[in-house]
Image: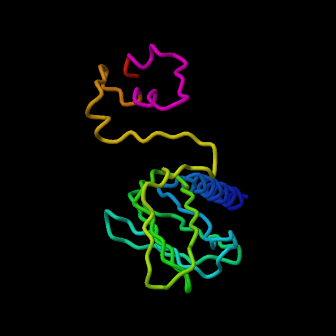
């Protein structure tokens, strides 16, 4: 009977540990770039090569489009990325660098023009990349924000009130530092 009780305790402990691990895996520290590659008529281009280059580190991430012309560059470290799309029989198109922030999914749709392989088109003055994949609102509080804002109580939790849509139930508790 004692062995059965010990076995049940060990089993429940393992189930509890496994339950905690699933919450830890849900924390993402990356971003993504998704989109479609089409020709001038709007038809998808299968097999186009899309490369995202991290301008700060020089790392290159690449993907190939599927039958619907879609590509996914998932789990990219946050930073500044330039996107380049190529396909045989089409001109190369380059997007200027843009910033990817934590948990952002940037949509970059590329339309390739028919031309020689050696021609390159550089897109300039493009609209900023917006996160259209979901309706989340987020704010990045960087080190400069931490240094420049005065915190009378030295309670870093006060910085959470800077994010859009944040409400404090008891504002007095923020001043106590508890």
Instruction: Decide whether residue 165 is among the magenta residues.
Output: yes
Q: Residue at x 66, y 59 (%)?
A: 11
Residue 167 in the image: state x and y as whole percent: 54, 23
Instruction: Decide whether residue 148 is among the magenta residues.
Output: no
Query: Relative to the observer, which residue lies in front, 149 or 86?
Result: 86
Residue 61 in the image: state x and y as whole percent: 46, 73
Query: Relative to the observer, which residue lies in front, 35 or 103?
Result: 35
> Does 51 appear above or below 77?
below
Task: Report the number of discs.
Answer: 0
> Does 88 appear above or below 133?
below
**Seen in the image, is 69 located left or right of residue 77?**
right
Q: Residue furthest top?
A: 172
Q: Residue at x 56, y 67 (%)?
A: 110
Q: Quadrant of the N terminus?
A: bottom right
Start-end of magenta stretch: 158-175
**Seen in the image, is 121 located left or right of residue 26?**
left
In which quadrant of the rendered view does residue 156 lie? top left
Q: Residue at x 51, y 16 (%)?
A: 170
Q: Quadrant of the C terminus?
A: top left
Residue 101 in the image: state x and y as whole percent: 45, 51
> Does 23 appear above or below 56?
above
In which quadrant of the rendered view does residue 9 lie? bottom right
Query: Relative to the observer, which residue lies in front, 37 or 149?
Result: 37
Residue 47 in the image: state x and y as whole percent: 61, 82
Q: Residue at x 43, y 54 (%)?
A: 125
The image's colouring method is rainbow
Q: Residue furthest front?
A: 115
């Amino acid at each position: 009977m004692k062995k059965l009780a010990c076995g049940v305790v060990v089993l429940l402990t393992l189930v509890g540990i496994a339950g905690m691990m699933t919450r830890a895996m849900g924390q993402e520290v990356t971003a993504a770039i998704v989109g479609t590659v089409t020709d001038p008529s709007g038809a998808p281009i299968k097999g186009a090569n899309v490369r995202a280059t991290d301008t700060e580190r020089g790392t290159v991430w690449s993907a190939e489009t599927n039958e619907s012309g879609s590509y996914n560059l998932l789990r990219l470290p946050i930073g500044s990325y330039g996107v380049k799309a190529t396909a045989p029989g089409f001109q190369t198109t380059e997007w200027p660098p843009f910033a990817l922030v934590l948990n952002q999914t940037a949509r970059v749709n590329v339309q390739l023009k028919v031309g020689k392989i050696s021609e390159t088109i550089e897109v300039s003055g493009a609209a900023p990349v917006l996160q259209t994949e979901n309706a989340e609102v987020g704010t990045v509080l960087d080190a400069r924000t931490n240094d420049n804002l005065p915190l009378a109580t030295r309670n870093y939790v006060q910085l959470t009130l800077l994010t859009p849509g944040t409400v404090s139930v008891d504002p007095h508790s923020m001043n106590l530092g508890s």
